[in-house]
Image (spheres, rainbow, N blue to C red):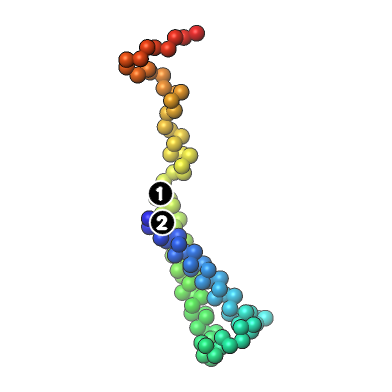
């Protein structure tokens, strides 16, 4: 349950981080040039706002990544490893009580 919740939050952080990075003004202008009116929405300090949001989202990204790695380690083995040690019906060598023993050929 906790693993799924952190995974969903991690996906939202990744989508937000990608969006904020693409919107930022880079050496060639970025998507902020194409949007045009973004500076009027956020004010004249648009660059510093996006830098702060990027830093916060990057920190959240690293925290969720580390916690997902820790929780996946705590979850244990993979499904194949869990069921590898369970004996199948064919591997049973002792018959159940009350049944006749199988004849050897």
Mark 2 vs 1: CB contact within 8 A: yes
Q: Nearer the viewer, residue 50 or 31?
A: 31
Could you say which is closer to the camera, residue 37 or residue 73? 37
- The image shows residue 103, relative to residue 33, as above or below, that is above
Asked if one can make out residue 22 in the rendered structure from this viewpoint, the answer is yes
> Which sits in the foreground, 13 or 61?
13
Q: Residue furthest left?
A: 98
Residue 63: image location, x then y, percent = 44, 65
Q: Residue, x 44% and y 43% (percent of image)?
A: 77
Give percent across and percent down for residue 54: 51, 75
Of circles 2 and 1, which is in front? Answer: 2
Total labels drawn = 2
Q: Secondary structure at mark 1?
A: loop
Q: Quadrant of residue 68?
A: bottom left
Residue shown at 41%/60% (left/top)?
A: 5
Q: Is residue 82 above or below residue 13?
A: above
Q: Residues within 10 Å of mark 1 (few under 14, many from 20)?
A: few
Q: Residues within 10 Å of mark 2 (few under 14, many from 20)?
A: some
Q: Residue at x 53, y 86 (%)?
A: 46
Task: Please give the label number shown on residue 3.
Answer: 2
How far across and how far down the image is residue 87, in percent? Answer: 42, 28
The answer to whether residue 26 is visible is: no
Q: Secondary structure at mark 2?
A: helix
Q: Quadrant of residue 101?
A: top left
């Amino acid at each position: 349950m906790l693993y799924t919740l952190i995974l969903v939050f991690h996906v939202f952080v990744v989508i937000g981080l990608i969006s904020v990075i693409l919107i930022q003004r880079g050496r060639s202008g970025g998507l902020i040039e194409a949007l045009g009116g973004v500076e009027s929405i956020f004010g004249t300090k648009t660059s510093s706002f996006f830098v702060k949001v990027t830093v916060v989202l990057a920190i959240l990204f690293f925290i969720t990544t580390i916690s997902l790695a820790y929780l996946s380690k705590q979850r244990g083995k993979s499904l194949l490893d869990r069921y590898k040690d369970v004996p199948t019906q064919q591997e049973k060598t002792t018959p159940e009580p009350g049944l006749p023993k199988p004849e050897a050929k």
